[in-house]
Image (cartoon, rainbow, N blue to C red):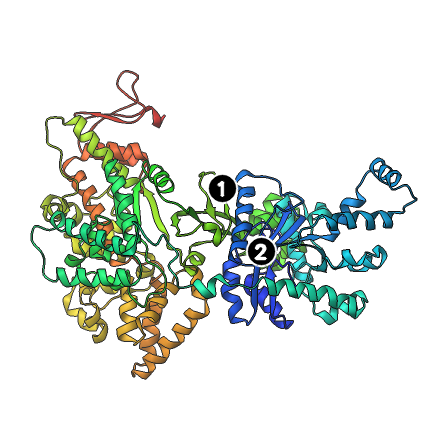
Amino acid sequence: MYINTHTYYSLRYGTMSVDQLLRQAKAHAIDSFALTDINTTSACMDFMRMAISYGIRPVIGVDFRDGISQCFVALAKDREGFLEINRFLSSVLHDKKIIPLRAPVFNQVIVVYPLRALIKRIDLLDEVWMQSAIKDLDFNIDRWSLRRYLVSVYVNQLNLNEYLGVSLDVLPLLKLLKLSKTCLDKLLFMPTVTFASKHDFNIHRLLRSIDCNCLLSKLPLLQEGDLQDQMLSKEALKVLFDTSDEFLESLIFKSKQILKDCLFNVIEKEGVVNNNKKNYLGSQKEDLLLLKQLCSQGVSYRYSSIPEGFEARLTKELDVICHQGFVSYFLINWDILSYARSKGYFYVGRGSGANSLVAYLLRITDVDPLELDLYFERFINIYRKNPPDFDIDFSWKDREDVTRYIFERFDHVALLATYNTFQYRGIVRELGKVFGLPKLEIDVLTKGGFNIKKLDKISLLVLKYASYIQGFPSHLSVHAGGILIAEHPINYWCATFMPPKGYPTTQFDMVVAEDVGLHKFDILSQRALAKIKDAMNLIAFNQPHQELPDIHNIAAFKKDPKVNNLLKEAKAIGCFYVESPAMRMLLKKLRVNDYLSLVAASSVIRPGVSSSGMMQAYIRRHRFPSLRKEANPVLLNLMPETYGVMVYQEDVIKVAHYFAGLTLGEADMLRRGMSGKFRSREEFQSVKKSFFKKCKSKGYEDSLTKTIWFQIESFAGYAFAKGHSASYAVESYQTLFLKAYYPLEYMVATLNNFGGFYSTELYIHEARLQGAQIHSPCINNSDYLCTISGQDIYLGFILL
């Protein structure tokens, strides 16, 4: 009977998570209800996925409001109906339109107008209009009669799938309205559900005050919901409103019929389906032929002679890629990067995608997985449920053009969103303002270190409610680089909004995108690539008679003693990923002087590995081979390169599968669950229990199992895949090569891109140490950016 419910994705209005709302419904024995957040479909896919486990049949739609003034509720009868709703909502959000009082003409959508809002509009009629209406009717009419007449006029204008919704506060007025049977047939029960309790209502009022940027005491009543907007049982409603069973039953019955007419579930039917663009060319057969052709062309570019194991590895990868339906995914990435190369854009393909030989042959990545014995199953395996993705870094100067190309080249494209949530300090500050605390007291609360016993009542309330609101979604933002390219319009799954970036953006995040089978393309940016490109241009300008080096000749760089000596001595200021004090210290401790050692160091430095004690273990075993016998024999056998220490993300899969005996599917879920939002899901908790259970059945001591689990848990959310580390190491070698042979040009490029760990002053000092003559900005010789002429570097006007 509930066709208008909200979660906290009704931003700065709702108070319940999807899970809390479902638990409320379950407690009231409700077997079906509709989620209709305010002007958003952010939670719809999560709601559909989670409702199944509660035994609840989900219905989805939108509560369309102008501000918080309800205009109408739209419920999707089927997928086409949800598409209609999302298209309409998207058009409103893109153009920042006002929500109209009447819905557009939908085909597969049920629209319910709030009777409360209609009566309010009637009551707001000015006296002149009212007197005119009375004169036209040619008889004396009181306000109730006028209401009855105008409601009947409104009902006569409703379409077949349009109704009037009766909210809790309108129920007592219906007896006075004395509507005709025609009107009553168009009425159904539509209470609003926003709160679980009075406590939630208090939270709601605080959120509304934050949204209105006003003191709680000054919050207008028109900006609040109603305390009665709670989920109540049918029996409680009868007692509360003293309404006849027959009348209330008829309203509830029609609401239930509406819910039955709207039953469908995108997640249940399509959760494991690949909804990305299915074919790059006309068919899967043509796509596969093109992929094989491109791999064949890539062999001559990548290898002078075919390495051992090449054919078997390529066949295996192509079989899995084809079986999992990812052929078009590889071809679309190839298309994007072919365009980038045609424009002369530098890029780096990284992430677990670097574990793929096919990706190497298609020039998506520059890491040879055969050389490093990279674990392809970390990227794609037949048990892996979540989709793979390539992380493609472009120069910060080039990414926007690549994004533009993708939106123009393909249909059904959208940027991926991310949720910004209220963080503790931020919400304490917001609540402090809402409660009227002076800035000095707010600063004390946000910085901590206070004596809680000395706080006054208001400050305690701020801390109390901050703990409740922390983690609520605050607003939608744009994912760092995620782009969706779907087979069907994105609006089949959600509405889109238009951020300042200027491209349609989903109303859900990457985790939900994966749930519905949409695999993101990560188009990212970094300044190091711009530094490399600018350095090459500066070399051509400053040393015109010298042949330009091939910056992609990584094989030669790996063997270059001058480059490796910079690594060994940690003289890496300005060089990508290896210039920070912590990284340079690690390079010295490990005595890194080759590519493979740098690959390991790039992952060892990550927070999880370094904080769990594994970095220290790795350093000791690397420096002192006799200590490698300390490693557990099973782990040492699984990870001989890293001496039995988990360093890379795929080590999680190996340990879970071979050490604990989990299936590859469970092992991948474990790896996925170690990061962020997925950790709390029941699937992950189930795998955690299975890990401990299977370790026990294998006879491992509890202390060993707990130690291994702690190591997995502490680093898997931060550590790199080996291919990712290898990609970073390639870029590090490129910058080290430029630093070794063209230090002045490279430092000028660094200054012009403002990129790096240190301040501009330090890079100027580094250039001086490399032999440069530094000149202050000069009207005769300087330009907007820093320039170089021989050994002379003229600082640019941009630094003024």
Residue drawn at point x = 20 percent, y = 52 percent: 360
Query: Residue 605: in sight, yes or no?
Result: no
Q: Quadrant of the N terminus?
A: bottom right
Q: Which mark is residue 157?
A: none
Identify the residue at image location x=17%, y=30%: 539
Residue 563 vertical placement versus 473 (above, below): above
The image quadrant that residue 690 belongs to is: bottom left
The residue most toward the top is 780
Disc 2 vs disc 1: Cβ atoms closer than 8 Å?
A: no
**Depth check: 448 or 399 in front?**
399
At label 1, the amino acid type is Met
- Mark 1 sits on what residue? 498
Name which quarter of the figure residue 137 lies in.
top right
- Farthest residue to the left: give it: 305
Which numbered disc, 2 or 1, marks the residue closer to the eye? 2
Q: Amino acid at mark 2?
A: Gly
Other residues around mark 2 within 10 Å, as few (<14) / some (14–19) / many (≥20): many
Taking the image as drawn, is residue 287 in sight?
Answer: yes
Q: Which label belongs to residue 61?
A: 2
Spot occupied by residue 780 in the image (x, y as percentages of width and height): 27, 15
As measured in the structure, the alpha-carbon distance from the residue carrying label 2 to the one carrying label 1 is 20 Å
Residue 68 lies, in percent from the top left, at 66, 48
Q: Residue at x 29, y 32 (%)?
A: 752
Position of residue 56 relative to residue 139, above or below, is below
**x%, y% of residue 89?**
56, 47
The secondary element bearing badge 1 is classed as loop
| First-in-chain label (2 vs 1) | 2
Categorize mark 1 by other alpha carbons within 10 Å: few (<14), some (14-19), many (20+): some
Choose between 2 and 9: the one closer to the eye: 2
Residue 11's x, y, as percent?
58, 51
Identify the element where label 2 is drawn.
strand
